[in-house]
Amino acid sequence: MSLEESGVLGLLRRDVAELKQDVASLFDCLTRFSVLKPSQVDASLHRHRFQALLLRCPCSSNSTFFDLMIDPGIVHPTLRFAGIPATGQVAACSQALNHSTSISQKYAVSPTRLYLFGGSPGDGGPLNSALCWDAVRGDWKELPPMPSARDVLAAAACDGRIYAMGGKDSGRASAAMECYDPDEGRWLHCASMRIARGGLGAAADSGHIYAVGGSDGRHALNVVERYDCITNTWSQALPLSTARRGIAVTGMAGCLYAIGGTDGREVLSSVESLCVLRGATDAPTSWTPLPPMLVARRAASAACVKGKIFVVGGAGQMGTDGGCLEVGEFFEPGKSSWEPLPPMQVARRGLAAMGVNDDLYVFGGSTGEQCTASVEAFDTVGGTWSVQPPMPQQRENFGSAQTQMMEMLGFSVGPATRHRFGLGQLSSSPPSRGSEAAGIPNPSIVSSSHGISRWG
């Protein structure tokens, strides 16, 4: 190497060292002032490196983790190398893995996608458009539109499929139930609810979807219907203790929570719950009252984050111009009262909320004067709100549902693979051949919805 080349190389090394210092300093500032979390930076860096590797060495595979481990070509050489005693150890490891994942999956599962269906752009006309937000990548995708345009509808997700139910179309209550299959990218028609209504809420648990409360256009309802995702049938469930429209509904640990809303005369702060967990020894005969919220609210949204129930936004008064709220609160089951949250930067009603790891995200809604595409995130650990990139479309009074993936041994395990491993609770048993042939989906998670005017 010539003297000149060595000098250039030395300059390059110095420049690289300075760039590393600059990056480290930038990283320190971003994380110290809570602009980004170290885990977010690490995830982004890993994603970019992996994409660069794929570009250099392109490959494709449809194999699952299950396919890999069941292949004798993989397992047999491993056992031959490890010796005969390893055979029993592999079997024991398999049993232990199945047991541990069934216990710990509730800690390993995190929502990864939010689906938004229908709603209104603010001019009163219902939408049939649909959007999907990926919480990992932070980007939006436009989906095939719903077969029917509706607003003040509800949505819930079961095993990766998303169901949109109820709402109103041009002022008329709807009983429609439609299902979107993300894997196939198409909509499926399901059995309609028994009672047409808008301003309802919905949640799912163990293969059933619960449509809660709402309005038939004249009266607030205490009706609760249960949909069986396997048989594609509706049945009557225990009615609410209080008729509610513009209700926020969420589910956690086998319980449904019906929050706020209005009975048609006043805005409610009351909350009630119902245990729907399969195998419960004492079947409930009615909804159980819980401590009331600090603030009465309708057209709010609820989500669960780390075992706590969060309720945000809404309106504190009756009427279409009722005051929008920027305040929220949270409740931990077993505690005696709700705790307040710092106010959002944008007061809103008819919004959606979603929990992702330690963060609570809120999307869209109406300020009372105009529809908004605003997105904010609340750090439940740091206790602060931050502004996020807006939605691609402004909308209010839409149905929202979130789907989840299970991280097992570093692999993202989707609904189909969970079925094959038999990983309980998060996924029910696979549908029968008859139900699949009929285009009837299959189950399990949570979500919320809202309404306005005589619907909420």
Image: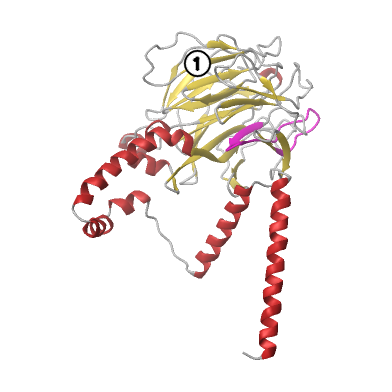
Q: Is residue 323 left or right of residue 432?
A: right
Asked if one can make out residue 441 in the rendered structure from this viewpoint, the answer is: no
Q: Amino acid at mark 1?
A: Leu
Q: Is residue 323 above or below residue 407?
A: above
Q: Is residue 45 magenta?
A: no
Q: Is residue 373 magenta?
A: yes
Which part of the image, by quadrant, shows the N terminus? Answer: bottom right
Q: Is residue 436 above or below residue 82?
A: above
Q: Residue furthest left?
A: 84
Q: Nearer the viewer, residue 368 or 65?
A: 65
Residue 285 locus on image (x, y percent):
45, 8
Residue 321 locus on image (x, y percent):
79, 22
Q: Is residue 367 left or right of residue 114?
A: right
Q: Which residues are magenta?
A: 352-376
* Location of mark 1 (residue): 274
Q: Residue furthest right?
A: 369
Find numbered disc 1 in the image and state the secondary structure of the residue it sits on: strand
Q: Nearer the viewer, residue 76 or 137?
A: 76
